[in-house]
């Protein structure tokens, strides 16, 4: 029998978190502190430019400060490291973010690891990832943190649930695992992480009470691969060519229509997890300003 699937929109979650952040921003303002984010952007990648523009907009709306340091594609490691080292000392910027991907001649790890762990609002620094694994997180990577907020907002509990994560990237899959496995209220899950070498994927996805899909493969998951009543978080953002004026449409990693009536809930693409990532970045930047 088919049942109704709840659509987990990101916007109400964002509004809810922003209300919480406003209190912190106001209390910092009384001390003359405006949370500041430095964004380092190298090259002309259109997706990165859109993402950086959206960050600037969100920070402005929250009365926070952000500044983009733009470099040409030919920027050198030394130039970027010098800038990051001076930003590490700055009192104006509480958070530093290096927009990825970087051009291939640049050592991404070396550059991102130069960001002080105290200003690592992306939560990618080995020290912050280590703290997360130890269960004492400081800066949690933004997308997994946003997913936890989404689950909490829609009263989807994780304790004792089997959560299946598709994807083992450093920015989504692995930190998602590290959060859900902790002895936290929004944790205490039994977690299975799948990847490209996973065999019989369908057998595993069918066991999920909560399925988090971050594979970057459009429509990897369909209605035949999930059990009735599953909650699905679709993280994927893929541009798929179509006949529209833009020439493409955005689609997730889940064949949305095929899971309707089977899943208990699903986050859509677009308008699902996407808007939460930037909000959690603002949240981390405010946290950094408070720590400071
Ligand atoms: P990634 O390419 O770094 O990692 C993808 C992961 O999926 C890999 O670990 C790989 O092993 C796994 N995978 C790929 N094909 C698979 C298959 N057939 N079966 C099982 N596992 C498979 O990607 P990422 O950076 O983690 O991003 C994943 C998706 O999420 C992308 O579409 C990206 O655009 C999107 N994303 C969205 C947000 C957001 O704010 N909503 C943030 C980050 C990433």
Image (spheres, rainbow, N blue to C red):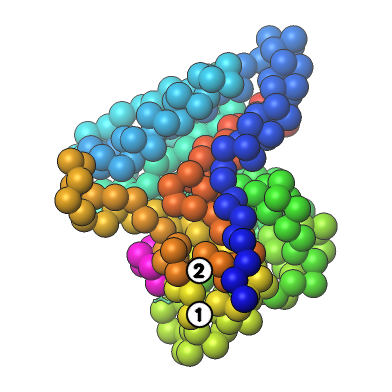
Mark with earlier residue (1, 2): 1
Pointer 2 residue: 259
Pointer 1 residue: 225
Please state if 29 lies on the left or on the right of 223 as rendered: right
Does any portion of residue 127 appear in the rendered image? no
Does any portion of residue 9 appear in the rendered image? yes
Please state if 37 lies on the left or on the right of 117 as rendered: left
- Classify the position of the C terminus by image quarter: top right
Rendering quadrant holding ligand 1: bottom left
The secondary element bearing badge 1 is classed as helix
* Magenta-drawn stretch contains 217: yes
Image point (70%, 64%), residue name: 180
Instruction: Please say if 32 is above or below 158.
Output: above
Image point (29%, 50%), residue name: 249
Relative to the observer, which residue lies in front, 134 or 227?
A: 227
- Quadrant in which residue 253 is drawn: bottom left
Q: Residue furthest front?
A: 1
Of circles 1 and 2, the one toward us is: 2
Image coordinates for residue 219, horizontal then vertical, percent:
38, 68
Instruction: Please say if 60 is above or below 247.
Output: above
Crowdedness of circle 1 by 10 Å Cα count: few (<14), some, many (20+)? some
* Magenta-drawn stretch contains 105: no
Instruction: Please say if 179 is above or below 59.
Output: below
Please state if 153 lies on the left or on the right of 252 as rendered: right
Most common secondary structure along the magenta stretch: loop
Image point (58%, 21%), residue name: 62
- Quadrant in which residue 289 is drawn: top right
Q: Give the range drawn in magenta.
A: 214-220
Image coordinates for residue 262, horizontal then vertical, percent:
57, 71
Relative to the observer, which residue lies in front, 9 or 285?
A: 9
Q: Distance between the residues labelled 1 and 2?
A: 9 Å
């Amino acid at each position: 029998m088919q049942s109704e699937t709840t659509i987990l929109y990101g916007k109400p979650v964002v509004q809810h978190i922003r209300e919480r952040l406003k209190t912190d921003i106001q209390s910092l303002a009384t001390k003359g502190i405006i949370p500041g984010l430095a964004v380092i952007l190298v090259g002309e990648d259109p997706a990165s430019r859109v993402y950086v523009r959206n960050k600037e907009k969100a920070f402005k709306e929250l009365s926070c400060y952000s500044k983009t340091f733009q470099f040409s594609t030919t920027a050198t490691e030394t130039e970027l490291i010098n800038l990051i080292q001076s930003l590490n000392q700055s009192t104006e910027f509480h958070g530093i973010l290096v927009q990825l991907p970087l051009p291939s001649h640049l050592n991404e790890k070396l550059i991102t690891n130069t960001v002080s762990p105290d200003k690592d609002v992306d939560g990618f620094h080995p020290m912050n990832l280590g703290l997360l694994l130890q269960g004492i997180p400081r800066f949690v990577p933004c997308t997994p943190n946003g997913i936890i907020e989404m689950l909490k907002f829609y009263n989807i509990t994780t304790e004792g649930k089997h959560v299946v994560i598709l994807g083992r990237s450093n920015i989504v899959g692995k930190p998602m695992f590290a959060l859900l496995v902790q002895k936290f209220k929004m944790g205490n899950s039994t977690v299975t992480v799948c990847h490209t070498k996973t065999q019989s994927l369908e057998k595993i996805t069918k066991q999920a009470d909560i399925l988090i899909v971050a594979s970057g493969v459009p429509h990897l998951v369909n209605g035949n691969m999930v059990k009735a009543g599953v909650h699905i978080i679709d993280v994927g953002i893929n541009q798929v060519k179509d006949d529209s004026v833009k020439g493409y449409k955005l689609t997730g990693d889940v064949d949305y229509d095929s899971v309707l009536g089977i899943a208990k809930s699903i986050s859509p693409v677009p308008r699902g997890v996407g808007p939460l990532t930037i909000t959690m970045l603002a949240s981390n930047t405010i946290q950094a300003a408070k720590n400071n």
